[in-house]
Image (spheres, rainbow, N blue to C red):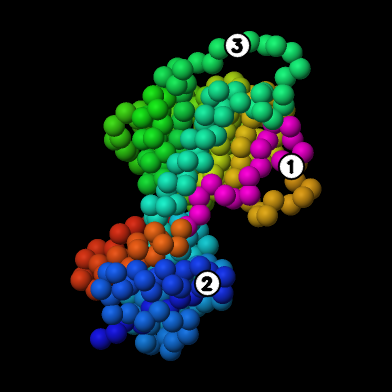
Amino acid sequence: MTLTVLFAASNEDWHKYGRALSDAFTQEGLDAELVTRASPQDVDYIVYAPTSTLQDFSPYKNTKAVLSLWAGVERIVTNDTLTFPLIKMVDPGMTQSMVEWVVGHVMRYHLGMDSHIVNPQREWEWHSNPLAQERRVCILGLGSLGTAVGEQLCRMNFRVSGWSRSAKNLDGIETFHGSDGLRDALATGEILVLLLPDTAETENTLNRETLAQLPKGAYILNPGRGPLIEDAALIEALDSGQVAHATLDVFRTEPLPQDHPFWAHPNVTVTPHIAAATRPVTSAKEIARNIVRGEKGEAFLNLVDRARGY
């Protein structure tokens, strides 16, 4: 019997993903029809973006799963009408994009490139940079993205540490976990990378107290989620020199308001949420594979843990 897969996202998303999803269904041998409208009782799966007009899932009595186009699920995970499995997007293309963005900015900080590129020196000031094995990089968040970033930095010989809520064991990465381990992890963060999910527990992970636990003159990269940082506390840390520079790709309000102090601060680089985006072709393949698993009665990959919020 032909499956009905409802595409519940914006028209712009439809133009990006519609053909890629149909092609992926064919490649996986799925007998499935991708539609933008359907009677709720006929829908087997929903491909979803939180910007969709669909917010009440209660009429979809026969739906087997919602497959998100986004990696972040904070805007949907608390929806009480969504009672069937919710699957977050873990896309190889998006992961590679994140790795490249983080590694690029880690190297920028590691080599002090801003002093030569962004603000050309007027005087000859020679100095030698440390080697990668002499630089400590700490990653807060060791999910699929954080692990991929850490593994690449390890291959480049950086001294990599990481922190997560629960214990992890990763080759080449010194790991910390739980509230007691956060202080120890932060102490290793000469360059700190934030890749935590946005939950009630992670909001303001970087605040006045935790920023003070970083090595003086630390650098911060946030391609994760805006609410991970207390904005006013970061400005204070930048002004005092506790933090040398911050490159921020995500914010509490997006686009970042024009009057926000981050725009004018000399030690902040703003990038417009470009570190990692879902790639239509690779993400469509992940969605199709998960639907195949569902039809075979196998466990879905990347299933959201509602209790943890991600």
Residue 125 in percent (x, y) is at: 68, 11
Q: Amino acid at mark 1?
A: Trp
- Classify residue 216 by image quadrant: top right
Left or right: 233 as drawn, with respect to 37: right
Q: Secondary structure at mark 1?
A: helix
**Which region shows up in magenta?**
262-278
Q: Is residue 273 shown in magenta?
A: yes
- Mark 2 is surrounded, within 10 Å at the Cα level, by few (under 14), some (14 to 19) or many (20 or more) other residues, namely few
Is residue 97 at least partly visible in the picture?
yes
Q: State the residue in front, 272 or 87.
A: 272
- Who's the residue at 39% across and 55% down the image? 90
Amino acid at the residue labelled 2: His
Which mark is drawn over residue 127?
3
Q: Which secondary structure is most common in the magenta stretch?
A: loop
Which residue does the numbered mark 2 point to in the structure image? 15
Q: Disc 1 marks which residue? A: 263
Q: Secondary structure at mark 2?
A: helix
Q: CA gap, disc 2 to disc 1?
A: 33 Å
Of the image marks 2 and 1, the number of the one nearer the N terminus: 2
Q: Is residue 112 above or below residue 103?
A: above
Nearer mark to the viewer, of 1 and 3: 3
